[in-house]
Image (tube, helix red, strand yellow):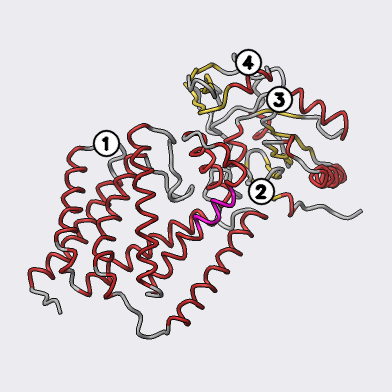
Amino acid sequence: MVKFSHKNKVASFGITASALGCAVWVGFRPEFSVSLLVALLAVLVLSIVFCKKYYPAGLTINRLLVGALFIFSSFTKGVDPLGTKYKILDYLSAYGMQWLNDAALVLAVTLILAEFIVGICLFLNMLPRLATLGATLLMIFFTATTYFDAMYDLVPDCGCFGNAIKMSNWQTFFKNIIIDSVLIPLIFNNKSLVNKRLTKLGQWLFAVVFAAGFVGFEIYNIRHLPVIDFMDWKVGKDMTPEDYDAGKIFVTYKNKETAETQEFESPNYPWNDSVWMSQWEFVSQRTEGGSQTLGFAMLDAGGEDFTHVLYETENLYVFVAPYIDEFTDEDFSLCGKMIETIENEGAEYIWLTAVLPENVGRFHEKYQMFYDVYYGDELELKTMVRSNPGLMLIDNGFIINKWAKIDFPIKKQ
């Protein structure tokens, strides 16, 4: 049996406290810092050196910290699984693994669930040894991935905390080193992690119940809208800019084959050229000058900016459909019924999409519903409503309500 001297007790709590101190430091340093890296590596080394002599109470604190962090991280992503899906698609594109694109949603749900189960089991001390193994495997994956992100800027934001907390790539990597430092004592003392209050069967039953409940939570947020909206376009927010001035809008595109990037001043780029658009993919958008707070431009088919329509129109219904070409027959039917409801109310509606005008025209010929159509950045459209199609009700820039397609407020005639 290991004897714990006063020195070991102080070291145990001191290492954990130092890790937490570094976490605060990381929060204020989004860029790379040599001094911060040295401090983190020092904490990591000390964690390894004293890992076998960690005080039991120190292990409990570390277990609760890691568990709580995993629970929080999984909740911020589980509330918006589609956001994690889009982030996984970014990674698959960055690593040339687009053949997995169709499985992106399944991967997102599975990864979030794994993170949640590991977190809840650690926090409640259920199957602690297995949970520690799961946390170790996840952190090996997360640390390696975020290292390459920080070094090569493969994906601008890893989405570790969904849209709740934004971190730079270096902050994310440093954050993972801190978690590793807190996790290491648990790894090397896993035999001492036991639950004497519940049998193994009881612990498994609790884990299965929590897993089932969390999967249901994820499915609900996929079918409807996130129960907590961490994005800019949330209900109750006034998007009206003060002293509106559009300024200059620049968009950056990357060639899918050569990875070459080019920046264009919108709308002076071949956005309506289907061949060019098939060879290039959108990367980012920025505004230079002006005072527009919406963060994106809403253009008509000719490239003219009509963003002001969103905050100059009363009770405007906005159909947000990044990919009209992915609509099912049921989607078109739901939209048609919703348009009838809107027209009966005497209200107005517009469409916002990211598909090419020629494709919209093709669908309009068949369904006769795409009259006032505007075009915007697909990334921004996906943050407006996590549904394709989705619907927003905006009154002079104030977001009154949002609906996923399954919840359209269709009134029976």
Residue 290 percent across, percent down from the top left: 50, 23
Q: Which residue is mark 3?
A: 356
Label 4 to label 2, Cα distance in Å?
A: 35 Å
Q: Is residue 110 magenta?
A: yes
Residue 102 appears at what percent x and percent y?
Answer: 62, 43
**Residue at x-position 46% and y-position 62%:** 116
Q: Which residues are magenta?
A: 105-112
**Residue corresponding to mark 4:** 270
Q: Which mark is residue 400?
A: 2
Q: CB under 8 Å between callouts 4 and 1?
A: no
- Decide: is 264 above or below 408: above
- Report how far apart the C-alphas of labels 4 and 1 lie in the structure: 37 Å
SS category of the residue bearing label 2: strand
Which of marks 4 and 3 precedes in the sequence?
Answer: 4
Q: Residues within 10 Å of mark 4 (few under 14, many from 20)?
A: few
Name the amino acid type tagged 4: Pro
Q: CA distance from mark 3 to mark 4?
A: 11 Å
Of the residues under marks 1 and 2, which one precedes in the sequence? 1
Most foreground residue, 78 or 300: 78
Instruction: Give the main secondary structure of the magenta stretch.
Output: helix
Mark 1 — residue? Answer: 32
Task: Kindly identify the amino acid type of the residue bearing the numbered disc 1.
Answer: Phe
Which label lies toward us, 3 or 2? 3
Q: Nearer the viewer, residue 412 or 157?
A: 157
> Which badge, 4 or 1, is on the more N-terminal residue?
1
Q: Disc 1 vs disc 2: Cβ atoms closer than 8 Å?
A: no
Asked if the stretch drawn in magenta spans residue 136, the answer is no
Secondary structure at numbered mark 3 = loop
Dividing the picture into quarters, in which one does residue 33 lie?
top left
Task: Specify the amino acid type for callout 2.
Answer: Ile
